[in-house]
């Protein structure tokens, strides 16, 4: 009755498999930070970095001009008026630029908003540094209130030569319900 | 271990099943549980099929005739969920329950009580899922893939019930798979080495590992949805720092192995049937095992081919395109082996063989349209069209479903002790074969011409093919009632089956009497080397 082909320890096998199940449930959740990490490292998905601090004097590349276009979108159900004050800027890589985005809350109640940026082409995302951006914080506007929200940014001088136009797109979300839930 | 089992069974060896209906509630017998799984999945097949007929009836003509778009969306969603989780998966678990112990010479499944639980969870899960149809706001309407934020932010209130139902189905599948793995690894009769196991056992072993690996990920993704909906998290909500594309990645990390979960056991079934009726041994047994394992491995690294249009970088598109095409190699090995098994065989064409041959031909068509979809630049045209619908229905209906029907015809004489009605079986086959092709083949054309999937109404130029497709759907759908009749007739009578049933049948399950006694292999059988696998 001795046969090496049969393991003959069902309990041990069962517990090993249960451990795999628990591990894979955890792995599903581990995919969330892993996904963000991959997006950050590679700049995929057009995600821009967090607030940028100028450490060294920026190299200014006077010979180039890069066109930066601004796009705004409202997430479904978001009633705010949201638009860039200027739609296109011609910027010199390495220089600090300032522009504004206009928001107006036409509804009859206070709404808190969060803007989410995205850059195309994706590979240019990591060369767009924002030293100040309304997207780093939430905005609350009372009913009928308006605001010009500032954005300060630098296009890195090491931006690949092939990129001549950058599109920075913002989608604005109504997050009042989420804040209330928390 | 086997000594313990023997002793236990010596006590009640001559007892049959318990009396009364409670037998089915408390049973831990693998044959009883297998039977319940099969009947349950057949009920779900008819339910999911009736939803499909609502869809096809609405699409018979352009314009809105029968149902409103909201209800139409609920039908596509429920059809997909019920067919995937309620019909195909439980049918294969039922076959595994009946056949795996008999094929490896084990007295029962390794964890019989858990086996009972894993079945009895299912009726509750699907009652909960089906009950959403009667809830305020209706059933889930976001497709069986339940992409966020469509499901999390715009789904009906019943989405929460859907999430709990998926949790229950997942628990059931995980328990069932653990049982299969433990049984196969620990309960084989002496001499039944891994490389002597029938291919059905091999494919189920690999399928069970896939299930154990990915069902927890599905549980994770629906849990994230639950938290986004009710607890203010933002896994998939961009406004809170999450990302809707993340949903698709996590879902398809589960979803792609899932589609192989629904086809690998079918490969095992066909690999048992074709050698029997070709009266030859299976060509390339070892290569079949390795091909199955390769397909299972590849299924984990190709998921984003479902998402070519989300805006992946070029390198990602190329990687997922080539990795996907690689799957054609082991699949090609399998198709080649089945054809080589039939080559110069003494073939006869009983109903199971007809279904198995149709499987090889039609599954290959579905595989080839899959290769077309794998071409990333072309996929931008095909994505979310009826071409995709035609593709996955070709691999799932004349693929998985035909293999399940083939398996039922092949093993039902062993289960019931009676032969099924061969004439009616052939009628059922030809109705299904013609119906399924009339149903799905035209969908390739309307898909290539640009008709989007999941729409209740369409442009006029698609009208003719949609009408043909709907006619096929009703032929295929109603011929399944004939299948029900044949099975019931066989359960209650028919020509007595011999132990071997089929002239060319090899394997342990054909060495025991027909119908299979309530307890089999209480004493481990001797494995005849030449009979080890078909």
Image (cartoon, rainbow, N blue to C red):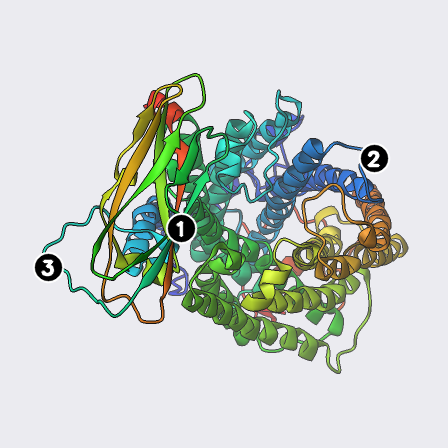
Q: Nearer the viewer, mark 3 or mark 2?
A: 3
Between B482 and B79, which is closer to the camera in this rendering? B79
Callout in the foreground (1, 3): 3
Q: Nearer the viewer, mark 1 or mark 2?
A: 2
User: Exactly how many numbered labels are in the figure?
Assistant: 3
**Image quadrant of residue B340?**
bottom right
Mark 3 nearby-residue class (10 Å; few <14, some 14–19, many ≥20) = few
Disc 1 to disc 2, C-alpha distance: 63 Å
State which chain disc 2 sits on. B
Query: Is B285 on the left or on the right of A45, as rendered?
Result: right
Residue where numbered disc 1 is placed: B1
Q: Which residue is mark 2?
A: B65
**Which residue carries the number 3 mark?**
A57
Chain for mark 1? B
Find the residue positioned furthest to the left. A56
Residue at x 36% of width, y 59% of height: A67
**Residue B92, image x, y percentages:** 61, 50
């Amino acid at each position: 009755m001795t046969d090496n082909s049969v393991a003959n320890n069902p309990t041990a096998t069962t517990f090993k498999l249960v451990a795999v199940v628990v591990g894979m449930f955890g792995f599903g959740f581990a995919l969330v930070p892993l996904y963000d990490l991959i997006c950050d490292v590679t700049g995929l998905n057009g995600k821009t970095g967090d607030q940028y601090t100028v450490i060294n004097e920026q190299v200014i590349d006077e010979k180039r001009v890069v066109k930066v276009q601004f796009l705004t979108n409202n997430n479904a159900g978001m009633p705010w008026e949201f638009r860039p004050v200027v739609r296109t800027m011609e910027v010199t890589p390495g220089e600090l630029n300032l522009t504004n985005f206009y928001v107006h809350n036409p509804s009859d109640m206070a709404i808190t908003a969060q803007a989410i940026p995205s850059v195309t082409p994706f590979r240019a995302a990591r060369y767009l540094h924002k030293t100040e951006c309304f997207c780093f914080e939430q905005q609350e506007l009372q009913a009928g209130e308006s605001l010009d929200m500032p954005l300060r940014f630098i296009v890195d001088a090491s931006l690949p030569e092939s990129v001549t136009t950058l599109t920075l797109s913002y989608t604005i979300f109504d997050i009042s319900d989420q804040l209330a839930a928390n | 271990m086997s000594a313990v089992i023997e002793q236990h069974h010596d006590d009640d060896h001559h007892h049959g099943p318990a009396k009364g209906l409670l037998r089915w509630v408390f049973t831990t017998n693998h044959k009883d549980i297998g039977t319940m799984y099969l009947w349950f999945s057949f009920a779900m097949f008819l339910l999911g099929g009736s939803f499909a007929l609502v869809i096809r009836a609405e699409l018979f003509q352009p314009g809105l005739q029968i149902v409103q778009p909201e209800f139409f969306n609920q039908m596509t969603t429920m059809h997909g969920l019920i067919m995937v989780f309620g019909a195909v998966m439980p049918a294969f678990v039922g076959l595994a329950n009946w056949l795996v112990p008999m094929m490896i010479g084990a007295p029962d499944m390794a964890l019989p009580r858990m086996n009972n639980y894993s079945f009895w969870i299912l009726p509750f899960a699907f009652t909960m899922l089906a009950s959403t149809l009667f809830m305020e706001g209706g059933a889930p309407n976001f497709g069986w893939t339940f992409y966020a934020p469509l499901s999390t932010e715009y789904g009906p209130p019943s989405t929460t019930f859907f999430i709990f139902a998926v949790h229950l189905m997942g628990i059931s599948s995980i328990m069932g798979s653990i049982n299969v793995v433990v049984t196969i690894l620990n309960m084989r009769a002496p001499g039944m080495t891994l490389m002597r196991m029938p291919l059905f056992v091999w494919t189920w072993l690999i399928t069970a590992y896939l299930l154990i690996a990915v069902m927890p990920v599905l549980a994770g993704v629906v849990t994230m949805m639950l938290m986004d909906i009710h607890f203010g998290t933002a896994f998939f909500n961009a406004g809170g720092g999450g990302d809707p594309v993340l949903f698709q990645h996590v879902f398809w990390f589960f979803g792609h192995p899932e589609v192989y979960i629904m086809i690998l056991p079918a490969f095992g079934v066909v690999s048992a049937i074709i050698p029997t009726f070709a009266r030859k041994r299976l060509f390339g047994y070892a290569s079949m095992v390795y091909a199955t394992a390769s397909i299972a491995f590849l299924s984990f690294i190709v998921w984003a081919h479902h998402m070519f249009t989300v805006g992946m970088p070029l390198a990602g598109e190329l990687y997922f395109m080539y990795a996907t095409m690689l799957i054609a190699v082991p699949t090609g090995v399998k198709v080649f082996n089945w054809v080589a098994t039939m080559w110069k065989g003494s073939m006869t064409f009983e109903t199971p063989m007809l279904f198995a041959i149709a499987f090889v031909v039609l599954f290959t068509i579905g595989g080839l349209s899959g290769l077309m979809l794998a071409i990333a630049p072309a996929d931008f045209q095909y994505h979310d069209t009826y071409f995709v619908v035609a593709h996955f229905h070709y691999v799932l209906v004349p693929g998985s479903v035909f293999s399940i029907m083939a398996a039922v015809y092949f093993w039902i004489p062993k289960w019931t002790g009676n032969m099924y009605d061969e004439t009616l079986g052939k009628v059922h086959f030809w109705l299904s074969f013609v119906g399924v092709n009339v149903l799905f083949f035209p969908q390739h054309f309307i898909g290539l011409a640009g008709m989007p999937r999941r729409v209740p109404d369409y442009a006029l130029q698609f009208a003719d093919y949609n009408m043909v497709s709907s006619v096929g759907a009703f032929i295929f759908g109603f011929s399944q009632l004939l299948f029900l009749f044949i099975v019931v007739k066989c359960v209650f009578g028919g020509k007595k089956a011999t132990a071997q049933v089929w002239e060319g049948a090899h394997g342990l399950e054909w060495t025991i009497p027909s119908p299979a006694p309530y307890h089999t292999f209480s004493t481990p059988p001797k494995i005849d080397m030449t009979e080890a696998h078909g």
